[in-house]
Amino acid sequence: MFKKITESQISRAIVGEFTKWFVDYIVSDVIVVGGGPSGLMAARDLANAGFKILIIESNNYIGGGFWIGGYFMNTLTFRAPADKILNELKIPHKEIEDGLFVADGPSACSKLISATCDSGAKILNLTKFDDVVLRSNRVEGAVINWSPVSALPRQITCVDPIALESKVVIDATGHDAWVAKSLEKRGLLKLQTYGPMDVNSSEDLVVEKTGEIYPGLYAIGMAVATVYGIPRMGPTFAGMLFSGRKAAGEIKKTLSLGTVAK
């Protein structure tokens, strides 16, 4: 029934195709660190605009909390006007109360992942952010390693990382804000910590504060809350989608105008 193929042909196909595109993406326009909803949204919009986008995700799956929502109940909530983006992504949803929409987590997440892949963005999963590439007081890339390296016994974790270059890096690592923290530990940024739950103020403030926090580094999604001390928003996702879209819009203008330092 199936075409006869050897094990070596399968291995050659995997290694050959992966390394071919990986080599090409050692230098890209934008590196998005974190493959949750805000990171996916930013990557999709930028790739659709013709930019070369690489997503780095520490887990072996993409989507973050977009898969499961709150309390392991995979019904996602969105406040208007997020229904416009849900329609754009062809995510089935319904209005529960005036301006409050729900969608199935696996459906919404898979649709966003698919749309991001279709845009041409590439994904390195099971890859952890280790540090930034920093030149002349500007972030110009990311240092990465395989995520399993962190799980190795300390005496055998001397596995050197590798570096990727880009014009812009986006911190989409959620409350952890790992990229921003790599600058804080060098005294280049001073971060706050996210505040207690307050959906109404949090979503608006996260989108409002989304943007460049250091030359070459943008914060989006809940990383914004950690940078600025904004309340957490919990299992609702309109702010995540609009934060990613806002950053993409700002970065598109910057890259199109050629105002990025070389």
Image: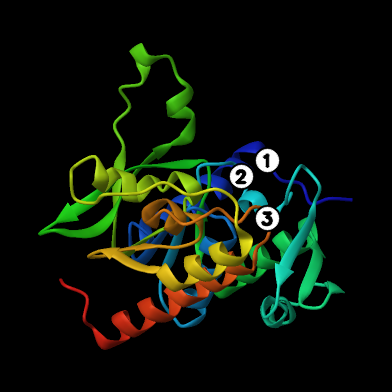
The x and y percentages for residue 203 are 56, 66
The image shows residue 210, relative to residue 55, as above or below, that is below
Q: Secondary structure at mark 1?
A: loop
Marks 3 and 2, the one that precedes in the sequence: 2
Quote the CA–CA distance across marks 2 and 1: 5 Å
The image shows residue 127, relative to residue 257, as above or below, that is above
The x and y percentages for residue 138 are 18, 61
How packed mark 1 is, by other alpha carbons closer than 10 Å (few <14, some 14-19, many 20 or more), is few
Marks 1 and 3, the one that precedes in the sequence: 1
The reply, left or right, for residue 143 in relation to residue 127 is left
Q: Residue at x 37, y 54 (%)?
A: 227
The answer to whether residue 161 is visible is yes
Residue type at mark 1: give it: Thr
Q: Residue at x 42, y 54 (%)?
A: 22
Residue placed under numbered mark 1 in the picture: 6
Contact flag, marks 1 and 3 (Cβ < 8 Å): no
Residue type at mark 3: give it: Phe
Residue ranking furthest to the bottom: 257
Q: Which of pointers 3 and 2 indicates the residue nearer the eye? A: 3
The x and y percentages for residue 257 are 27, 87
Quote the CA–CA distance across marks 1 and 3: 38 Å
The x and y percentages for residue 74 are 80, 51
Q: Secondary structure at mark 2?
A: helix
Q: Which of pointers 1 and 3 indicates the residue nearer the eye? A: 3
Q: Residue at x 60, y 51 (%)?
A: 197
The answer to whether residue 167 is visible is no
Quadrant in the rendering for residue 12:
top right
Quadrant in the rendering for residue 28:
bottom left
Residue placed under numbered mark 2 in the picture: 9
Residue type at mark 2: give it: Gln
Residue placed under numbered mark 3 in the picture: 66
The reply, left or right, for residue 123 in relation to residue 92 is left
